[in-house]
Amino acid sequence: MVVALASWLLVHAAEEKKAAPLKVLLVLGGCCHDYETQQQILKAGIESRIEAVVDIEYNPSKGTDATFPIYEKDDWAAGYDVVIHDECSASVTDKVYVQRILEAHRGGVPAVNLHCGMHCYRWGDFKEPVKLGDDNAGWYEMIGLQSTGHGPQSPITITYTDSAHPVTKGLEGWTTINEELYNNVQIFDSASPLATGRQIQMPKVKKGEKPDPEAKGTEVESVVAWTNQYGPKKTRIFSTTIGHNNETVADDRYLDLVTRGILWATGRLQ
């Protein structure tokens, strides 16, 4: 399987050289992650796998209120084949700003959403299932799945549930290092799951209390990778909630998955 995947990457790299390099916009920054390092890991990992030029829009802010100057323009995505949303901006609630981001994707610009990109631009009672068309549903509709939180950092066993899909064909599941398993409040009909993650989660311990040495963990399962068709043009969207720690982002298996998601979203992987 590994040999077959390596052969595919070599053949596809040769085919990609015949086409114009993909113009990729990577947006990242905000709370809770080492984006300063991860921007370079992602750029190098993508550009070494396919013919692509990755431009970076990085905000060094460590807060959940991180915003990005590029989004202030109506034509902010002009010239790009795909946008990677890797920002962590949970408390940004400027509706005009958010709608400007979404409008580009409704208009046909593909997106790849990574990790905390799922927890951005939320307001209202966002922990409850939103309804399509609701004031606070826009970001979730683009993603295709509503997630509102995650478990502790511990290993996640990833299983590809749709191994025939172009994104996952030839890939093998693995068990991560310590990572966060994002919950699934709901999956929209426009989305198609590709992989699940299973994690053993121990009972939560209140502050000041000691954990029960006899306590047993519970296995929790969530969808961790999927595709979505968004808006009137059925824009291709690929997302994965994996990718908190640098070691995971640098893992060849993760970079292969993300790169294939990019190729699928841009129509270069059938």
Image (tube, rainbow, N blue to C red):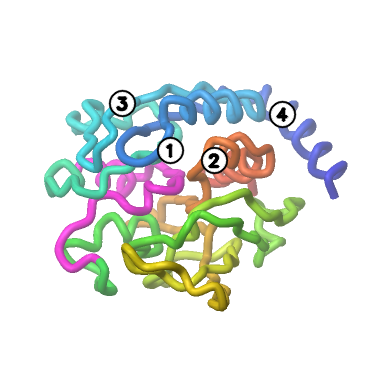
Who comes first in sequence, dot 3 or dot 1? Answer: 3
Alpha-carbon distance for marks 2 and 4?
Answer: 14 Å
Q: Position of residue 117 (x, y in %)?
A: 37, 47
- Label 3 and label 1: CA atoms lie apart by 17 Å
Which comes before the other along the chain, label 2 or label 4?
4
Q: Quadrant of residue 140?
A: bottom left
- Type of amino acid at the residue the image marks with label 2: Ile
Distance in Å between CA atoms under marks 1 and 2: 9 Å
Mark linked to residue 262: 2
The spot of residue 78 in percent (x, y) is: 32, 28
Q: Is residue 124 magenta?
A: yes
Quickly name the residue at label 3: 60
Q: Quadrant of residue 188?
A: bottom left
Q: Which residues are magenta?
A: 99-126
Q: Name the residue rendered at 45%, 45% in the picture.
A: 114
Question: Which residue is denoted by mark 1 in the rendering?
Answer: 84
The residue tagged 4 is 13
Q: What residue lies at 59% left-to-right and 67% top-to-bottom?
A: 198
Cβ atoms at labels 1 and 2 below 8 Å apart: yes
Q: Is residue 171 magenta?
A: no
> Do the residues under discs 2 and 3 have CB atoms within 8 angstroms?
no
